[in-house]
């Protein structure tokens, strides 16, 4: 197609003359292609906002656009954007398209994103290994590989040669560092999803990334001891099954640890998270979440009154906890004690059915200790009205002078009499509102 999309632009102007008659004037701007004359960096931004199939089709617009797509700095390939049928020939369309784009590409590729469903794309000797080698030689800064394949492919070794890498998100991979890996000096964010790690590869990787600020490990499976020590990390998310987790991250401001326990593969007795060490290393923490079995396992390694310092910046705590379990109750109490500026608490209440029970632990806490002096909001999910849960709520309402909202979700477990007792509990704050959901 030889004509441009801005080939003809007509503007109609209809002013009134002094005599009140209408005059029409037509101003025609012909053969002026405004879009095509934009700077290359602007055209690149436009193309990067389009689905890549549409970006390639801009070669039909005009001669000036014929090869513009071939220098795009960001390439995103999504298999769902292609009509992939049952026939083998149709299933290869996606692969052929990627090969065509990469073979004709001219210039740096700063971002590469692949969303794939096919096993053979990522298998040993598959296309991803050749593509990753090409990326490592093109100064790539952002790599994202997402797949529904469950821990089924090994990260290509050439990935670890991407010296300019700043951001990486890999899903469904088996993770193992090559012996000569020297680290990513520029990377600031690492995100691994549905992956399996051998030995302490994660800890070694973090140690070799001096500017890493954000680490997200989602649905991790590891039978090794994981030890992560970093003075640069600001945001930390760890979710999965592991044998042992050791964290020393003094400047993390936001942390979320979620331990999943599968007794068929990872015995509960073998799971160990040293919470005391982790809390003891923190200097700048602002919000912390301990979910799944993380708080349960951490409770075995925390000693009441032994946390080394106050966490003056800590304002939000989220826990999944059995308030009737003595060890977990003690651990939670320790956290509340070292957070004098705590403003928000959210608890996912559960009943584990084992461990040393306690019914009066929260009733025995000194109400004059000022445990919740700055607390403004509390959310109790799955509230069943047990003596331990009611004792904690009573302590909180009586010991929080600036509390504004106490939100209780009971999932229809409480009868009318129990609800009435909750609403009649004495409150230290005249502004405190108890909301039952």
Image (cartoon, grey):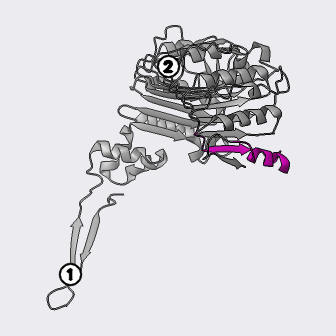
Residues drawn in magenta: 402-426
Q: For the residues carrying marks 1 and 2, which lies nearer the camera in this image?
A: 2
Which residue: 71% across, 25% down? 365
Left or right: where does residue 58 sit relative to residue 269?
left
Q: Secondary structure at mark 2?
A: loop
Which residue: 34% across, 60% down? 5
Circle 1 residues within 10 Å: few <14, some 14–19, many ≥20: few
Q: Which quadrant holds the N terminus? A: bottom left
Residue 405, percent from left and from top = 63, 45
Residue 379, percent from left and from top = 67, 40
Disc marking residue 283: 2
Which residue: 70% across, 33% down? 395
Q: Residue furthest top?
A: 179
The one nearer the camera, 194 or 59, is 194
Closer to the chain start, of discs 1 and 2, is: 1
Circle 2 residues within 10 Å: few <14, some 14–19, many ≥20: some
Which residue: 47% across, 22% down? 133
Residue 90, percent from left and from top = 62, 44
Q: Evaluate whether residue 267 shows in this view.
A: no
Is 345 placed above or below 285 here? below
Disc marking residue 15: 1
Q: CA distance from mark 1 to mark 2?
A: 70 Å
Residue 250, percent from left and from top = 50, 17
Q: Secondary structure at mark 1?
A: loop
Asked if the stretch drawn in magenta spans residue 364, the answer is no
Q: Residue furthest front?
A: 368
The one nearer the camera, 147 or 368, is 368
The one nearer the camera, 85 or 287, is 287
Residue 324 occupies quadrant:
top right
Asked if the stretch drawn in magenta spans residue 421, the answer is yes
């Amino acid at each position: 197609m030889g004509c441009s999309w801005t080939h003809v632009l007509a503007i109609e102007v209809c002013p009134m003359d002094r005599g009140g008659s209408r005059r029409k004037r037509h101003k025609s701007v012909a053969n002026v292609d405004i879009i095509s004359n934009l700077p290359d960096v602007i055209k690149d931004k436009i193309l990067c906002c389009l689905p890549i199939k549409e970006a390639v089709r801009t070669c039909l617009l005009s001669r000036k656009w014929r090869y513009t797509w071939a220098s795009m700095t960001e390439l995103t390939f999504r298999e769902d954007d292609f009509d992939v049928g049952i026939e083998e020939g149709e299933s290869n369309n996606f692969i052929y398209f990627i090969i065509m784009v990469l073979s004709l590409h001219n210039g740096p590729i700063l971002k590469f994103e692949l969303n794939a469903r096919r096993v053979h794309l990522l298998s040993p000797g598959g296309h991803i290994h050749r593509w990753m080698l090409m990326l490592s030689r093109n100064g790539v800064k952002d790599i994202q590989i997402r797949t529904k394949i469950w821990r089924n492919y090994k990260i290509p070794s050439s990935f670890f040669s991407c010296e300019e890498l700043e951001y990486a998100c890999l899903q469904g991979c088996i993770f193992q560092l090559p012996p000569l890996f020297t680290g990513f000096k520029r990377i600031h964010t690492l995100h691994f999803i549905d992956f399996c790690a051998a030995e302490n590869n994660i800890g070694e990787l973090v140690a070799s990334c001096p500017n890493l600020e954000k680490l997200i490990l989602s649905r991790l499976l590891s039978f090794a001891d994981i030890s992560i020590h970093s003075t640069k990390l600001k945001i930390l998310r760890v979710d999965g099954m592991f044998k042992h987790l050791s964290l020393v991250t003094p400047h993390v401001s936001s942390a979320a640890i979620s331990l999943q326990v599968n007794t068929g593969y990872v015995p509960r007795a073998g799971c160990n998270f040293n919470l005391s060490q982790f809390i003891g290393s923190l200097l700048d923490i602002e919000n912390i979440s301990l979910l799944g079995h993380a708080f349960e396992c951490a409770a075995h390694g925390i000693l009441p009154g032994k946390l080394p310092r106050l966490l003056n910046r800590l304002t939000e705590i989220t826990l999944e906890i059995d308030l009737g379990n003595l060890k977990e109750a003690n651990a939670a109490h320790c956290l509340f004690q070292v957070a004098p500026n705590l403003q928000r608490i959210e608890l996912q209440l559960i009943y584990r059915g084992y461990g040393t029970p306690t019914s009066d632990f929260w009733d025995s806490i000194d109400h004059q200790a000022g445990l919740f002096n700055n607390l403004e909001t509390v959310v109790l999910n799955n509230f069943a009205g047990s003596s331990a849960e009611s004792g904690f709520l009573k302590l909180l309402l009586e010991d929080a002078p600036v509390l504004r909202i106490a939100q209780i979700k009971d999932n229809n477990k409480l009868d009318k009499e129990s609800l009435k007792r909750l609403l009649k509990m004495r409150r230290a704050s005249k502004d405190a509102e108890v909301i039952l959901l």
